[in-house]
Image (cartoon, rainbow, N blue to C red):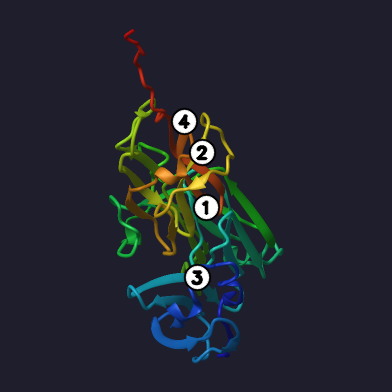
Amino acid sequence: MKSHPLKTLCLAALFVGCGIVHAQDYTYFVRQIQMPDEAEWDVSVDQSGSQQSPLAINPNGARFELWTVRSNPLTSYLLDTTYVNSYIPVASVSIVSEDPYSVIPRTRADRPFEVKITVNGMSLDPTAPEAARTVKLLRHVQAYAGNDNGTAVNRANASLISQGSLDSNGEHTLSYPVTSIPGGDRTKVRGEERFSVFSVADYQAPESQLSSKFVQIWPMADGSIHGLSAGDVIKGKAPNVQVRLNDLYPDSFTFVQVYEGSPQLGVDGDRVPGSSILVDSSVPRSENLVLKDWDKSIESDGTWTLEVITITPFGTDRLNYLSFEVDRAIKVNGSVTSVD
């Protein structure tokens, strides 16, 4: 039996660019599961570094699971796993999206992502056991119910949508233009995709998960404007306007702006006071805004545009807009007469 250098599974990069969630909000531990009796041992780990495994690894190998626990709300996530055996290949899975947040990989329903699978220690000897020459790759998808954010998801209910095998060492990259999570409105799907690498069972070692990662998929935001309609004419005080915002992306900044003229993309208008929302959570958020006393943003008569803008890791998007008219000029109709 031998010990194993217990590494915290690339934790050194976990907080690179995460931005909105602080490291102190999370704690980490590694669970070692001995095969074949599945005895467990947990050990706390730092954000980065390595240490020896608490238990020696017997001939049947051991599985290591990296867990993170968030303090508020109290939630635990399985971040990664690996299986160690004398001849089983070693594999790791990483997921890359346009969102730099990496505590748990995430992206938006309309955006692409990549899965990188690295395999090492695979035998090139055609006479070696199959378990030493190949690994299995599985892809699961799972939609979150309603507006659930995945805190209580049962991953045993995920749907397997593809499986295959890898028979060479090195890095293998899989690219996906959009998610395959099921849903009628493709802009509003929410859930996760999970990519797992398994060893092949043989006489000495059971089929074991070598590595697994999931990416959370969040819906596209939308917004609606109430209290003012396209083409309305404002002759006096500007009316109160309600703005309903749904599914604002995590780590996003959303605001309402007004500018003179017809709708145009990329215009830097006057930001309406009280309309700015910074989403600093790890899940989407919905908000209702009431805009009051925004007359000072309207400086003259003519055509004006009210626009809802959101800025996310993917760029700047216009959620809604409308143009209206302002006509506050006082017109006096009358006549002048004289009596001789």
Q: Amino acid at mark 2?
A: Tyr
Tag 2 or tag 4, which sits nearer the N-term? 2
- Quadrant for residue 78, please give it: bottom left
Q: Which residue is mark 2?
A: 259
Q: Nearer the viewer, mark 1 or mark 3?
A: 1
Front residue of this view, candidates 184 and 91: 184
Residue linked to disc 4:
301
How many C-alpha atoms fall within 10 Å of the one at disc 2: few (<14), some, or many (≥20)?
many
Identify residue for label 3. 80
Which disc, if any, is residue 11? none
Tell me the tag on residue 312: 1
**In this rendering, which labeled residue sits more in front, label 1 or label 2?**
2
How far apart marks 4 and 2 lie (CA) works out to 12 Å
Label 3 crowd (10 A; few <14 / some 14-19 / many >=20) = many
- Earlier along the polypeptide chain: callout 1 or callout 2? 2
First in residue order: circle 4 vs circle 3: 3
Q: Badge 1: few (under 14), some or many (20 or more) residues near its Cα, within 10 Å?
A: some
For the residues labelled 1 and 2, the Cα–Cα distance comes to 22 Å
Relative to 20, say whether 136 is above or below.
above
> Which mark lies nearer to you, 2 or 3?
2
Residue 230, image x, y percentages: 38, 28
CA gap, disc 1 to disc 3? 27 Å
Q: Which one is in front in this view, the residue at disc 4 or the one at disc 2?
A: 4
